[in-house]
Image: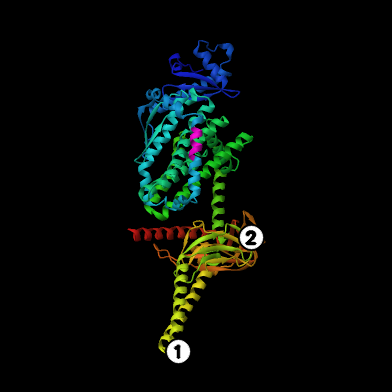
Amino acid sequence: MEAFRSSELGHLSLSAGVDGDAMHYHVHDRRNGRIFRVDREIALALHALRYGRHPTADDDQDAGPFRRLFGFLKSNRQMLETEQSRAKPFNPLFIQMPIVDLGRWQSAFEGVARLLVGPQFFLLFGLLAVAASVLASSQDWSILNQFGQIFSLSALASFALVAPILKLLHEFGHFLVATRYKVQVRDGGLYFIGLYPMPFVDCSMADLQANRGQRIAISLAGLAVDLSVALVALIAWHFAPGGFGKTLLANIFFFSSLNSVLFNGNPLIKLDGYYALSDWIGQRNLGTRAQARLKRTMRWVTNLGADGDMPRTREGAGLVTFGLLSMFYRINILLTIAWIMLPRFFGLGIVLVAWGAYVMFLSPMLSTSSGGAPPRRKGATRRRAVFWGGLIGGITALLLLVRVPYIVVLPLQLDRADTYEVSFNAGGPARAEIAQLASDGGVAAGDVLLSATSLDLDQSDTILAAEQAFLVVARDAVQGIDPAETLAATERLRLIESQQASARIQRAALEIRAPGNGMFAAQSDLGTGAILTDGQVIGAFYPHDGAAVLTGQFPDRYVELFRTEFTDLEFRVNGGSTTGFDLVEYGLVEIANRDTETGGRSFAFRAVVDVPAARVVGSEVFLRLQIGDAPFRDHVLFFFNTLWERYWDARIALNSTA
């Protein structure tokens, strides 16, 4: 058996801890900072070896704990020799630069850590969440209207300026929680994604110095800071004046919250959420084991059973599932980046997509490469060729021979603007003040929806009545004496009567009643005392009888297909398919105002269904259309043509605003 000098063992420190009812053991190699989790047998053998007990002939050195320990030591020595003999490959897209030993500063922040870390943080976070929710609800979550602008070039550029500061706060959260639990923080510094700097802190000593609950808290500290920053930005957005500052606060809210949910808090990516999950289930090397198990399974599949193996236990199946979910999630993120960025910024989009592919797929493969693939079993090469040949042939047949319809899912809503809106039409320029406005809910035929008063009409009535009385007296005084004056007074009286008739029409318009039984939804910005102008919308009335009119935005790219190919339609209401919506008529309606940036046309889908509109209020209605059918090849070409058209539309829009 290979011998190991005592000086070599001196670089290894052994620690033990308790998580619940289970013991865990770690070996820390101080030469390279690596921390290994080992089982009880290896830990006891290392302890015995370091304290003078050496294996003898009676120990059966070819088996047992000492053999496993020597295997571990040999692997660690080989890893260290490899690191020392071969420089770490230079990665131009990811450079890590330690700058400061943060352990020296932890004692200075112990007071701050005790003040902020603990139940008091959850109380503060809850207050922020309540305040943000109340403010956002009071304005109908109007901040969400700016979500569509967060991927604009100006938004990305402005956020890039503050992202390192937000990341610094994120890392400071890890630092404070580690300090609170007496965990030594090693280094702090910068890592560069390309040339873009982002801060980091090294809390890896938590494996040795913290229990499971504390490690989970340290992992989730940055996530808690991100969400707190998002809440503060949301509150500040409601009080900020318009302009760059308000836009920047909205971008901080969106990016901080989305970054927490989609990335930092997501256990499928090796970030904070992943390490918290790994500690929670007691699998600190979950990602590595899942990738290794998935690779063996993929080898079994691609070699048609001649190499690799399938999982035979629940744990193995769980690891394969986790590996697949992680892979598909990264693919989904990459495709989402491509779909959003390529049409807007073609060149920059290609760079971002390529960088994303490198970071999420190629870089992990290179970093975990063991220097060569394991030898294939006999017959594996032939079976592998059969698999890939069959897969390529199947994909080719799928693209060329299999025909599938184009699927379009449209969210529909009641056609409020053109069909159900109720407007205040006074028939003139008179301004009115709301005295009564019906609340949202059911109304019966004849119920008052709106009652208003008009000071202008009141003053006009008074003046016209006084002038009418004066003219009657004047006409009676000259009647039979001066025919011309009598005729003039009579004509003036007729004019006043005409004005009074017009005023009566306007006064009648001050009261609007329900035309039948139905549901009324008042305009959210109106209430008692609000001033109305002629033609102003006061709400919407949805009747309890008749057919409902539904409408929704129709994707321009499917317009020609819709007009030329047979279409099958299916309604889905509140998440389920329904046959209660009998279609009366449907079609496309071109929206009058074209896109001001690109000049492109916009279309709305309009459907009349044999269901009362009042029954549809509050329901989520989706229409699933199957438009014609075409080979998969045409679907792929259609997708890239659409992407290309979106790119040119974005270019036209950018040029028009330049």
Residue 376: give its label: none
Residue 657 vs residue 111, the one in the foreground: 111
* Element class at badge 2: helix
Compared to 365, does 38 lie above or below?
above
- Residue 16 on image: x %, y %: 53, 20
Residue 255 left/right relative to 389: left
Residue 480: give its label: 1
Q: Which residue is mark 2?
A: 615
Compared to 398, does 424 lie above or below?
below
- Residue 414 on image: x %, y %: 57, 62
Q: Amino acid at mark 1?
A: Gly
- Residue 292 on image: x %, y %: 54, 35
Q: CA distance from mark 2 to mark 1?
A: 69 Å
Numbered range of the magenta stretch: 121-128
Asked whether residue 271 is in view, the answer is no
Corner quadrant of residue 113:
top left
Residue found at x 54% / y 13%: 55
Residue found at x 49% / y 25%: 207
Quadrant, the C terminus: bottom left
Residue found at x 44% / y 72%: 463
Residue 91 left/right relative to 605: left
* Element class at badge 1: loop
Compared to 505, does 343 lie above or below?
above
Foreground mark, 2 or 1, reads 1
- Residue 566 on image: x %, y %: 58, 67
Q: Amino acid at mark 2?
A: Arg
The extreme left residue here reads: 658
Q: Residues within 10 Å of mark 2 (few under 14, many from 20)?
A: some
